[in-house]
Every structure is written in C-alpha cells, then in structure tokens.
Image (cartoon, rainbow, N blue to C red):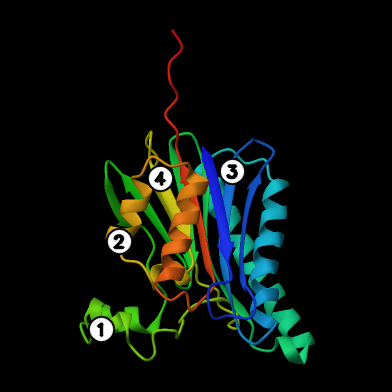
Amino acid sequence: MEIAYQTDIGQEREDNQDYVGVFTNQERLTFAIVADGIGGHQGGDVASSMAVSHIGYHFEQTAFENPMQAVQWLSSEVRDENEKIIDKSNQFKDLKGMGTTMVAAIFFDDQMVVANIGDSRGYLRRNGELHQLTEDHSLVNELVKRGEITEQEAKTHPQKNIITRTLGISPDADIDINLYQLEPDDQLLLCTDGLTNMLDNQQLESVLQGSQSLQEKCQQLIKLANQAGGPDNITVLIAENVREVAKP
C-alpha cells in the first residue's frame, strides 16, 4: 500500500484545524486517519490533533491481524476518544464545544475497514470509476435523503456547515464502520470538506486517474481547491493498492 498526504490552510483561514496521520501496528498493518476540527479559535485544532495522535498511537500498540478485530478495536477506541475530548473541553473555557470529524481506514491484504463520523469523506476509485464510500453526517444530507432539497441545492445551502455527528460535543459518538474488498490498483481518497466543497467527483476522478505520483496528486487537488476559492482548510490523503509485479 502506497500512501501520500498533504494538508493546507486554504485561502481564508488564519489557522489549520485539520490533522492527518498514517500509523503502523505490530502486525505491519497500516492505519490512515484524517480529522477536521470544529469549535472556537483553538478548540477545533485541539480536538482534531487529539483524535489523530491518540488513536494513531493506540493503533501502533495493537497486534490484531483480521478485519473483525479491527472493527471492534476502532469502535471502542472512538468511544474512548470521544470521552477524552469532552473531558478536555469541560476543563478549559476556551475549548468549550470543541469537536472533530474523522475519516479513517485500516488496510489488510485484500480488505479494508473504513470509518467516518461527520462530513470528512472516503472515496474508492476502482476500474476508472469513483464511488463515495462514506455518508455525510450533516443537516443538508438529511434534507437530501428526505427529498426536501436536491444535491445541487445542498452545495449552497445556508446551513451546509451544520454537522449532526462528531467526536466530542455529544456523549454518543455514533461512528459508521464498514468493511470493503480491496483489489489491485484500487485508490482510496480520504479528505476533509475543504476539498469536496470545492471540487466535484469529475474533478477528483480527473486528478486520481493521472500518471503523477500520489504526492503530486495530493498537491494538485489542493491547488484546484484553492483556485476555486479555498475558503476552508484542505486535507487530502491518497492510498493506492499497488499491484505487485511478478518476478521472472
């Protein structure tokens, strides 16, 4: 599995409240995580860094080697981290109401566990087609699902920033965790809404299908999001399940 990532402050924000990390456990499994902080000048930065650094560190201590163990571990870990973020926000007045979105993946030989809470997203590119794996936990997505607004209207809805599920803020951190098959040449894109609010699926696919390195693709996606306005922090992580060439 080859992985590259990049984070950028964007064009309008004074600080970057996104965090991203890649970690390896005792069985050489890889864990990738992207978080987008919410709340206050400092709070979002603290919450997203806590989620990435704590969960990542705990992953490095694990020795599980099958997907079901990973699902159970991640579910428990997220509940624990949710409590830590809430406890920290209750201790300090300037951190009150902080929280973070999260999207993460754990990679196995032929499977991957993908988890998300909030509106940071995971996409799978396979055989030239891009599919969104995660579902946004947001007010506008609920309105779209109920047929009250269209997906096009959701892009400019005045309440598009209202998140319905996060880490922190609420005692109930209800995270979605799903298991997917992993095929040779699959690409997984994990990103914050600073990217997806600026670029559509066709633009994402156009960059991912290119011949550049993964790092160059990350840079190109961030450049396009900034050229489109870049009103938010932008974080991009691309993982590619590189096909092993048989030795002669």
Helix, strand or loop at mark 4: strand
Residue 181 coordinates in the image, percent (x, y): 38, 42
Q: Most extreme residue toward the right, as rendered?
A: 91
Above or below for 169 versus 201: below
Helix, strand or loop at mark 1: helix
Q: Would you name the residue on which mark 4 appears?
A: 187
Camera-nearest label, 3 or 2 = 2
Residue depicted at 40% across the width and 45% down the height: 187
Residue 90 coordinates in the image, percent (x, y): 74, 87
Helix, strand or loop at mark 3: strand
Helix, strand or loop at mark 2: helix
Q: The residue under label 1 is which amino acid type? A: Glu
Tell me, for residue 201, which label it has, or none: 2
Tell me, for residue 153, which label it has, or none: 1
Q: Residues within 10 Å of mark 1 (few under 14, many from 20)?
A: few
Q: Is residue 83 left or right of residue 192?
A: right
Q: The residue under label 3 is which amino acid type? A: Thr
Q: Residues within 10 Å of mark 4 (few under 14, many from 20)?
A: many
Residue depicted at 50% across the width and 58% down the height: 236
Q: Is residue 24 left or right of residue 102?
A: right
Q: The residue under label 2 is which amino acid type? A: Asn
Query: Is any part of residue 68 visible from this angle?
Result: no
Q: The residue under label 4 is which amino acid type? A: Gln
Instruction: Please report whichever mark, 2 or 4, sits nearer to the chain's N-terminal start.
Output: 4
Q: Are marks 3 and 2 in contact (CB under 8 Å)?
A: no
Residue 109 coordinates in the image, percent (x, y): 48, 34
Q: Residues within 10 Å of mark 2 (few under 14, many from 20)?
A: few
Instruction: Please report whichever mark, 1 or 4, sits nearer to the chain's N-terminal start.
Output: 1
| Quarter of the view holding residue 96 | bottom right
Q: Would you name the residue on which mark 3 appears?
A: 30
